[in-house]
Image (tube, helix red, strand yellow):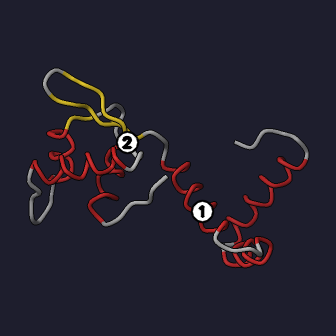
Amino acid sequence: MAGLSGSLERAVMDVLWSAPRALRVRELLETLNDGARKPLAYNTVQTVAERLVGKGMIERTPDGLAFRYAPKRGREDYAVDLMLGALTEYDDHGAVLTRFAESVAPEDAQQLLEALRRRASGKEVT
């Protein structure tokens, strides 16, 4: 999965990840512009949405003469893809994983340890 490039792509994805349903460009625009210092143009948001479709991040479905946009995967799955992508860039996965485990906050390390224990024992990780 391609990564997000730029704050506007991230903002559009954040809106879509938080939305209870697929959104039209007009709905995306309203949410993005709510409280914005400099409002975005409709065409700008539409272009970004189409770029995200091309990257495989979101899907579009016809809705009358327009389209609705929704994320293909959740925020957590996207973060996992980024982390796994970074891990595969290095031959020594053990060193990278060790450094990562040493760098996270203690409560996150504990959660990671518990998830690894469940996985090692064959229990489902949620």
Foreground residue, 51 or 16? 51
Name the spot of residue 14 as percent of width and height, x first. Answer: 36, 52
Name the spot of residue 2 as percent of width and height, x first. Answer: 45, 56
Which type of secondary structure does the marked residue at label 2 adopt? strand
Q: Quadrant of residue 23?
A: top left
**Dot 2: within a 10 Å radius of its alpha carbon, few (fewer than 14), some, or many (20 or more) residues?**
many
- Sequence-first tag of 1 and 2: 2
Residue in view at x 21 percent, y 23 percent? 63
Residue in view at x 41 percent, y 46 percent? 57
Say which amino acid is labelled 1.
Gly
Q: Which residue does the numbered mark 2 point to in the structure image?
A: 58
Name the spot of residue 55 as percent of width and height, x first. Answer: 38, 50
Say which amino acid is labelled 2.
Ile
Q: Quadrant of residue 85?
A: bottom right
Which type of secondary structure does the marked residue at label 1 adopt? helix
Q: Give the farthest residue toward the right.
A: 121
Residue 7 in the image: above or below residue 40: below
Residue in view at x 34 percent, y 39 percent? 19
Q: Which mark is residue 93?
A: none
Does 57 sit left or right of 97 as displayed? left
Quadrant location, the C terminus? top right
Name the spot of residue 37 as percent of width and height, x first. Answer: 11, 66
Does 14 sit left or right of 106 as displayed? left
Q: Give the farthest residue toward the top.
A: 64
Q: Which residue does the numbered mark 1 point to in the structure image?
A: 85
